[in-house]
Image (cartoon, rainbow, N blue to C red):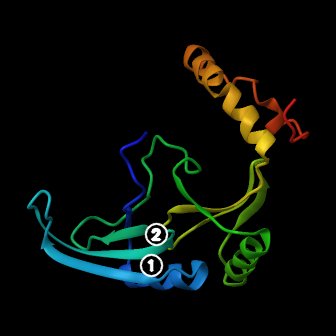
Amino acid sequence: MSIVRGVHHVAYRCKNAKQTVEWYKKYLDMDFILAIAEDEVPSTKEPDPYMHIFLDLGGGNILAFFELPTKDEMLSPADANTPAWTQHLALKVESMETMMQVKARMEADGIEVLGPVDHTLFQSIYFRDPSGHRLELAVDTTTPAMSKALDEVKWEMLEEWDRTKKAPQHARWMHDGSGQPR
């Protein structure tokens, strides 16, 4: 059993703390729950003023951001060697209706939204926040049979990937259009 008991918080850098709080409230209905501002980094003692904001993700989870006014402008939330689609935060929503309402509200305000994308196990949409962080809203569509089939092959898939660095075909049903384990 894991010693970890959940996510305390996930933290990212943002371009503007106030704009970030307002955006997450408007589009994802996240409550602003805490602000911490210091002139010195507690862990490193580096003299560096910052604003650290905390938003309620639900379920006892917190999404946090740092605004760092003395640092060079934030050019990208990901490193240059990582594709832009890779690093993202996926957030669970209860229904397709909720997800599509968020999509419509964002698109009405000119925010580019990709999807919905059918991942067989879930449906999702993708978009970026004002700082450029890639976010995903996901609705679970997994059946018990799907979960069981994937659980049965996970180690074989990982071992094959580790040897070959080619996509194993153990769960091809997820992408062949059938959506059903064989």
Is residue 2 found left or right of 95 in the rendered image?
Answer: left
Q: Residue furthest right?
A: 178
The quarter of the displayed image where residue 114 is located: bottom right
> Measuring 57% from the left and 13% from the top, which residue is drawn there?
163
Q: Earlier in the sequence, mark 2 or mark 1?
A: 1
Give the image location of residue 42, x and y in percent: 13, 64
Q: CA distance from mark 2 to mark 1?
A: 8 Å
- In the rendered image of this protein, does residue 117 appear above or below residue 146? below
Give the image location of residue 19, x and y in percent: 44, 83
Please tell me how crowded label 1 is: few (under 14), some (14-19), or many (20+) other residues with Cα within 10 Å: many
> Measuring 69% from the left and 27% from the top, which residue is drawn there?
152
Give the image location of residue 59, x and y in percent: 51, 68
Q: Are marks 2 and 1 in contact (CB under 8 Å)?
A: yes
Q: Give the residue pinned by disc 2.
A: 131
> Measuring 70% from the left and 23% from the top, which residue is drawn there?
168
Is residue 81 found left or right of 84 in the rendered image?
Answer: left
The nearer-to-camera label among 2 and 1 is 1
**In which quadrant is the C terminus drawn?**
top right
SS label for mark 2:
loop
> Measuring 80% from the left and 40% from the top, which residue is drawn there?
145
- Is 143 or 38 nearer to us in this picture? 143
For the residue marked with disc 1, what is the amino acid?
Thr
- In the rendered image of this protein, does residue 182 appear above or below residue 83? above
Is residue 59 found left or right of 2 in the rendered image?
Answer: right
Please tell me how crowded label 2 is: few (under 14), some (14-19), or many (20+) other residues with Cα within 10 Å: some
The quarter of the displayed image where residue 67 is located: bottom left
- Is 80 or 46 nearer to us in this picture? 46
SS label for mark 1:
helix
- In the rendered image of this protein, does residue 69 appear above or below residue 78? below
Q: Give the residue pinned by disc 1.
A: 20
For the residue marked with disc 2, what is the amino acid?
Ser
- Is 74 or 30 nearer to us in this picture? 30
